[in-house]
Amino acid sequence: MIEFSNEEKEIIVTKIQAYFNAELNQEIGQFDAEFLMDFFTEKIGVLFYNRGLYDAQAILESRMDHLAEAITELEMPVK
């Protein structure tokens, strides 16, 4: 399960509360917002985490391809 620091939890809970207030015209308490955060973290958090890993891997592969091309360009011809 993904672990958040206390500061991160506060930010997430505040955003959940703001969303409920702005979009659903409902007040949601601290406890309910934390419960909702824990539910989503447990049930779908891993999907977001894995997507981040895949995106990072794609960026790294792209950079490695560019590095390989740059090294090839530096090669000197053999006579």
Image (tube, rainbow, N blue to C red):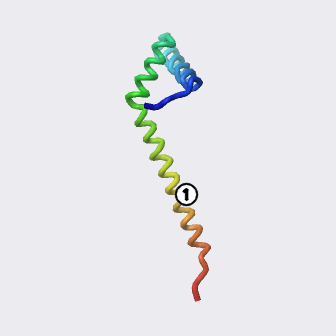
Residue 25 appears in the figure: no
Q: Position of residue 28 (x, y in %)?
A: 48, 12
Depicted 35 relative to depicted 54: above or below: above
Residue 55 in view here: yes
Farthest left residue?
A: 43
Most extreme residue toward the bottom is 79
Q: Secondary structure at mark 1?
A: helix
> Which residue does the image show at 59% across and 72% down from the upper left?
73
* Image height of 46 relative to 10, above or below: below
The residue that disc 1 covers is: 63
- Residue 21 or 51: which is nearer the viewer? 51
**Kind of residue at badge 1:** Arg
Quadrant for the N terminus, please. Answer: top left
Task: Give the quadrant of the C terminus.
Answer: bottom right
What residue is shown at x 52% (from left), y 20% (from top)?
Answer: 13
**x and y percentages locating residue 27 in the rendered image:** 49, 10
